[in-house]
Image (spheres, helix red, strand yellow):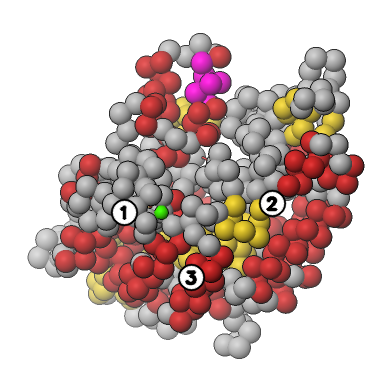
Amino acid sequence: MASASTKKWWKNAIIYQIYPRSFCDSNGDGIGDIPGIISKLHYLKELGVDVIWLSPVYLSPNFDNGYDISDYMQINPEFGTMGDMERLISRAKRLGIKIIMDLVINHTSDEHEWFKKALEGDKKYREYYYFREGKGHRPPNNWTSFFGGKAWTKTDKGDYYLHLFSKKQPDLNWHNPDVYKEVTDIMRFWLDKGVSGFRCDVINIIYKETLENGKRHFALTGKEHYLNTEGCHELIQRFNSEIWSKYKTFIVGESVFVTPPEAKLLSDESRKELDAVFFFEHMDVDSRGVKWFKKKYRPCKLIKILDKWQDALEFPANYLENHDQVRSVNHFGNTGKYWEKSAKLLCGLNLSLRGIPFIYEGEEIGMTNGDFRGLRDIKDIESYNINQSMKKMLFMHSVRRKLILRTTRDNARTPVQWDSSEGAGFTTGTPWIKINANKSYINVESESQDEGSILNFYKQMIEFRKGSQALVEGTYRRVASPNDVYIFTRESTEERLYIYCNLTAFNRSVEFYGDKIIFDNYDANERENFYLKPYEFRIVASNI
Ligand code: ISL
Ligand code: CA
């Protein structure tokens, strides 16, 4: 057990993700911005947020909404100025809120100075990326991109460059010590400005071991050459020992396609790499290999996956939604009759698991997927590229429309609904992406006034968690999972809590343990003694 002085500050933190474009627009141009975030700091404080993870605000041509960076040391003017960013850091600090920034270092934008110089033929900068000659009329290897299509694009000179995402996102060459120097300077620049750490984008794929052909894979060919490579672990260890450990940072890595043993290697405290990692297995519980093809969601599968990861990792980064995923009430809950109950249940689940809970903007009011009418309403580059690939494969329009609207990342990117007005309190202008019609009743203003709202449930649950040694640092043990009810304990030296999550829209009888219900998303008078109501979430304390 770590003593109070050596204990890491983030071990009991609640982290809130802001996708700046969709959070709050202060100047009516329809795009969320940093002054907008500053205006909502008190709201976040009151919610109980300790740390903000800020999705990219750097200079960017925005082909992937900031995940394509053209200058890491400048702020995108759409979002504000460096002065605004410094104000955000200092105002947040005054309220006791820390900020971690998104660090996208697998690739830059093709509009980054480095890449532009490389294209002009500058020898030094060509080594920052992967430029290779093709093989006859074909690219240098058979790798495919995360966003569909090939991972190589031909330049005007006839050679190719590698991009694991869109062609506007060329991959950096991490074999080059100059790249290490540049990026670590960027890290120091922001840490010196007072940010408290980073969320490292696709960190486990940055180091390509070789550029050989990959085994053919229906979704992603080539990945065995860059997933969790030894070189990647070495790089992260160097980041940690040379930079992160010198500041009191919290570093969470987005690690794609990881298995529990791989995630352990990336985040085990003793290995001094990352503090925590995001895994994806629960997001894919209803996908058939690729996320665009869905199968029926089965709660028992979700339980199995969560349980496996709870057992595997000391301190996982827990989340049920983010800017790349559909909204969690659509994914795992209910958007009809049990919208409110299921949103509260998911809150309870996310905040009761062992690890560090992440809440994505709008999740705390139960926001739902976008109500897009057609592909016209979709802005995301991933959806755009996938649509092109599906066209090539001769999918009919109606099929493409159905598959893409159901899973597009834009589902989570509609503006935060602050009130029921036309611009939802998000903007006075025309929003960059369509606002959901259900802002009429799903919004911060009305939920603030309603004691029984999802928003108030979040506040109570956050407060409860903070006061509970068992939830913050207790052990985890699955008790049972009969008929899609997840029952587990969290236990510290002082208390044992039984957590019940009925992940279905039906009454469920279960065996009850413990002595006293101390938290529930049903009122005492609606509750039943011998079974759980639909989507009931219950915490029962037991004397030990
Ligand atoms: O969306 C996905 C899973 O459903 C992934 O394919 C996603 O692209 C992947 O998890 C990587 O995501 C991160 O890097 C991307 C960026 O577009 C995402 O927004 C970011 O979270 C490239 O920088
Ligand atoms: Ca704006």
Which part of the image, by quadrant, shows the N terminus? bottom right
Q: CA distance from mark 1 to mark 2?
A: 30 Å
Please provide percent x and percent y for residue 391: 51, 16
- The outermost residue toward the left is 525
Q: Quadrant of residue 171?
A: top right
Q: CA distance from mark 2 to mark 3?
A: 23 Å
Q: What number of labels is visible? A: 3
Please say whether residue 260 is visible from this viewpoint: no
Residue closest to the eye, 357 or 53 = 53
Of the image marks 1 and 3, the number of the one nearer the N terminus = 3
Please provide percent x and percent y for residue 360: 42, 56
SS at mark 3 in the image: helix
Q: CA distance from mark 1 to mark 3?
A: 18 Å
Q: Is residue 100 above or below residue 122?
A: below
Q: Amino acid at mark 2?
A: Ile
Q: Residue at x 72, y 74 (%)?
A: 245
Residue 41 sits inside the magenta stretch: no
Q: Which mark is residue 105?
A: 2
Which part of the image, by quadrant, shows the C terminus? bottom left
Q: Which residues are magenta?
A: 386-391
In contact (CB < 8 Å): disc 2 and disc 3: no
Q: Within 8 Å of ligand 1, the CB of disc 2? A: no
Of the image marks 2 and 3, the number of the one nearer the N terminus = 3
Q: Residue at x 45, y 39 (%)?
A: 409
SS at mark 2 in the image: loop
Q: Is residue 269 above or below residue 299?
A: below
Q: Amino acid at mark 3?
A: Leu
Q: Within 8 Å of ligand 2, the CB of disc 1? A: no
Quickly name the residue at label 3: 88
Quickly name the residue at label 1: 426
